[in-house]
Amino acid sequence: MIVGIGILVVLGVALFLLLGGKDSPLGSILPGSEAPVPTFAFTSSISKYEATAIHVDKKKQTAAAKQVTPQIRDVVTKLFQAGYVDPSTWGDTGAIEDLFTKDAQGQLEANVDTLTLGTGADAVYATVQPGKSKLKVTALTDTNAGVIRAMAEPWFNAIAANDDGTFTDISVTGTLFLVKDGNDWKIEAFSLNRELQPGKAPATSASPSETP
């Protein structure tokens, strides 16, 4: 009995060290474990400018548009990460309100089903895997080639795994208008359209041990 208990203790300690509790690398494949939340990023982005004055250096305006594009892209990326990719913030306008101006924040609740996956999304969807998405940023320039406003046109694509075992293709397109608010760019107006269609399970790549 003493030897038997000793063996069980040793095996238990070894198993604990192997699994590492909640931080175990095997945790993601154990029954009941939660899949990690994907990190969304636009696959590609382009920038251009629209001048509000004539006789302004085109090279300076092009450079200004390219300089501001990463900042605009960061705002729009955060919007889709919180609104569509992260299940913990589906339908939560509080998670995205800091990306909008004070005036625009008053329009969030009325548009929660396009700015996010929706208030009842957790009762329908299990996870969302973002796909290839792109962004076009147009900078509105002034007489000094400075950017006074920006227009972002996202093409967001993702596939959702539904709770019933089926899949849904998600597509969001439209326009976001941004303005400088202190040191940050914020969304002051928006017009988005969301389309949901029955989808197929995403293809999985073969492991190195599998024969093509």
Image (cartoon, grey):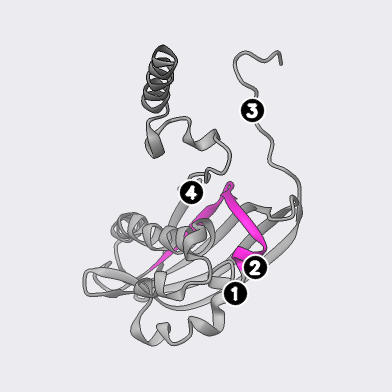
Q: Which mark is residue 192?
A: none
Q: Main secondary structure of the magenta part?
A: strand
Which marked residue is nearer to the observer: mark 3 or mark 2? 3
Q: Nearer the viewer, mark 4 or mark 1?
A: 4
Pointer 3: residues within 10 angstroms few (<14), some, or many (20+)? Answer: few
The answer to whether residue 8 is seen in the rendering is yes
Residue type beneath disc 1: Asp
Amino acid tagged 4: Val
Residue that appears at 61% across and 52% down: 158
Residue 135 rendering spot, x and y as whole percentages: 50, 56
Residue at the spot of label 2: 194
Q: Give the Cα distance between marks 3 and 2.
A: 29 Å
Q: Earlier in the sequence, mark 1 or mark 3?
A: 1
Number of marks in picture = 4
Asked whether residue 96 is in view, the answer is no
From the image, tell me which residue sits under label 4.
37
Place of residue 124 in the rendered image (x, y in percent of width and height, measured from the top left) = 67, 63
Q: Which residue corresponds to mark 1?
A: 113
Residue 108 percent location from the top left of the image: 48, 81
Q: Residues within 10 Å of mark 2 (few under 14, many from 20)?
A: some
As measured in the structure, the alpha-carbon distance from the residue carrying label 1 to the one carrying label 3 is: 33 Å
Helix, strand or loop for disc 3: loop
Q: CA distance from mark 2 to mark 4?
A: 21 Å
Query: Three-letter amino acid code at disc 2?
Result: Arg
